[in-house]
Amino acid sequence: MSVVRSHTYSVDPADLEEFLARRASLIGTVRETHPGLTAALLVELEDGTYSDTWHWESDAQMGAALAAISTFPEAPLTMALTRDATALNGRVVDER
């Protein structure tokens, strides 16, 4: 089964456009250097926070990308526009 890494955070509305551009760049770099990222879904929740879930083919692929996160210059630039960030990893047990 696939695995996910789910982030929850806030983004100032004034920074949202720049955040989306930086996030897109980060996703592109991750996909170029670490195969296995199958989807990245950003959802604005009703309380104004965002849920950002990245789907991976395997735990090993996700782990390799996370281990290399410091090599992606876009990562700190993107996350600098967020606040109150949390992250959780999980395993998909049912997908329809």
Image (cartoon, rainbow, N blue to C red):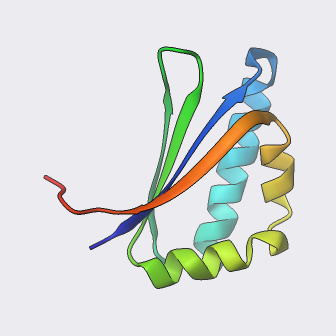
Seen from the viewer's position, the closer of residues 88 and 18 is 88
Vertically, is 75 above or below 44?
below
Residue 55, x across and y down, in percent: 42, 60
Residue 66 horizontal/vertical position (percent): 65, 72
Q: Is residue 78 above or below residue 33?
A: above
Q: Is residue 7 left or right of residue 92?
A: right
In this image, 27 relative to 93: left or right? right
Residue 75 picture quarter: bottom right
Q: Quick check: 26 above or below 23? A: below
What residue appears at the point 63 percent right and 75 percent down from the top-left corner?
65
User: Which residue does the image show at 73% across and 16% down from the upper left?
Assistant: 13
Locate residue 35, reporting x and y percent: 52, 79
32 or 47, nearer to the observer: 47
Image quadrant where one finds the N terminus: bottom left
Q: Is residue 38 visible?
A: yes
Q: Is residue 34 visible?
A: no
Which residue corresponds to the image point at 58% horizontal and 69% vertical from the top-left?
Answer: 31
Residue at 78% x, 46% y is 79
Q: Position of residue 63 (x, y in %)?
A: 57, 78
